[in-house]
Amino acid sequence: MKKFCLIFAVFLILVVSGCGKDDEMSKKDIVQRASDVAVEYIRVKEDKDFVVKDAEFSSATNSSIVFVYGYYKPEKDKEVVLMVDSADDYKITGVGSN
């Protein structure tokens, strides 16, 4: 019985630790996809080239919003941020600039 419990505990630890790595990979994939969508959105809607500087998930708990920060290619001093909702088929939910 002790041997069974030990094997079960090791199996459970391996499963849980493996799932954590999958989540991390999927977050990177989500951020990359959101960045690609932001670049395409600016190209289509504003006919400008958008350069991504950074992208991150919203700090709100369980948020699916990814903030994509960057600038228009000829205007490095004009920062732009796009809000991309990864749960809503990567819909752009907001655009702001300084």
Image (cartoon, helix red, strand yellow):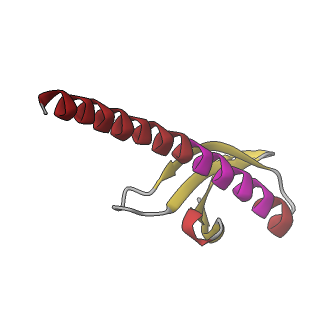
Image height of 86 relative to 24, above or below? below
> Is residue 34 part of the magenta span, yes or no?
yes
Asked whether residue 78 is in view, the answer is: no
Instruction: Specify the segment rendered in magenta.
Output: 28-41
**Residue 69: x and y, percent?**
59, 50
Which quarter of the rendering shows the C terminus?
bottom right
Which quarter of the rendering shows the N terminus?
top left
Is 3 displayed left or right of 33 in the figure? Answer: left
Image height of 3 relative to 67, above or below? above
Q: Nearer the viewer, residue 94 or 14?
A: 14
The residue lying at 50 percent from left, 48 percent from top is 56
Q: Which of 44 and 79 is in front in this view?
A: 44
**Residue 4: x and y, percent?**
21, 33
Q: Residue furthest left?
A: 2
> Is residue 50 part of the magenta span, yes or no?
no
Is 27 displayed left or right of 59 in the figure? Answer: right
The residue lying at 49 percent from left, 63 percent from top is 64
> How would you classify the magenta stretch by its main secondary structure?
helix
**Residue 89: x and y, percent?**
65, 68
Is 81 displayed left or right of 20 in the figure? Answer: right
Asked whether residue 49 is in view, the answer is: yes
The part of the image, by quadrant, that contains residue 10 is top left
Q: How many labels does the image show?
A: 0
The residue lying at 49 percent from left, 41 percent from top is 22
